[in-house]
Image: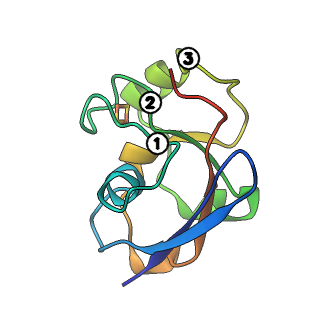
Amino acid sequence: MPSVIYVSSNGSRKSVAVEVGVSVMAGAVEHGVDGIVGQCGGNAICGTCHVYVNPDQLSLLEPIADDEAATLEIVAAERRPNSRLGCQIAMKPELDGLIVEMPEYQL
Ligand code: FES
């Protein structure tokens, strides 16, 4: 099972095995990772699953779809070039070791 390394805004790291097909947001919520809320349940509406993806791994992700792009405009914390919605990143074997940093706040 591929793993995701969640890095909190204070620098603490937690590595979590996330099933293929399950999103980075759902993996965090299921394993009690603080810093990702997932208020809309993964529908790319709320923006509370905002993460900063390790720039070296950005090219492994699917391109940003229109609904994700629109929601990234309204995220609570600063949007950066490596901002993505965790609910729109479905785990796949190639993403093993994906590093995502959570912003200081989601709401
Ligand atoms: S969980 Fe709401 S936008 Fe990702």
Q: Pointer 2: residues within 10 angstroms few (<14), some, or many (20+)?
A: many
> Does the Cβ of the disc 1 residue fall within 8 Å of ligand 1?
no
Q: Residues within 10 Å of mark 1 (few under 14, many from 20)?
A: many
- Quick one: SS at disc 2? loop
Question: Residue 77's image quarter?
Answer: top right
The percent position of residue 7, horizontal first and vertical second, equals: 65, 57
Determine crowd level at label 3: few under 14, some 14-19, many 20+ residues with C-alpha closer than 10 A. Answer: few
Confirm if mark 2 falls within 8 A of ligand 1.
Answer: yes
Q: Which mark is residue 84?
A: none
Name the residue rendered at 36%, 60% in the picture.
27
Which residue in the protein does label 1 denote?
Answer: 36
Residue 96 versus residue 17: which sits nearer the camera?
17
SS class, disc 1:
loop
Nearer the observer, 57 or 23: 23
User: Residue 71, position in %: x, y?
Assistant: 45, 22
Q: Residue type at mark 2? A: Thr
Residue 73 badge: 3
Three-letter code for the amino acid on which mark 3 is drawn: Glu
Q: Which label sits on residue 48?
A: 2
Q: Disc 1 residue type? A: Ile
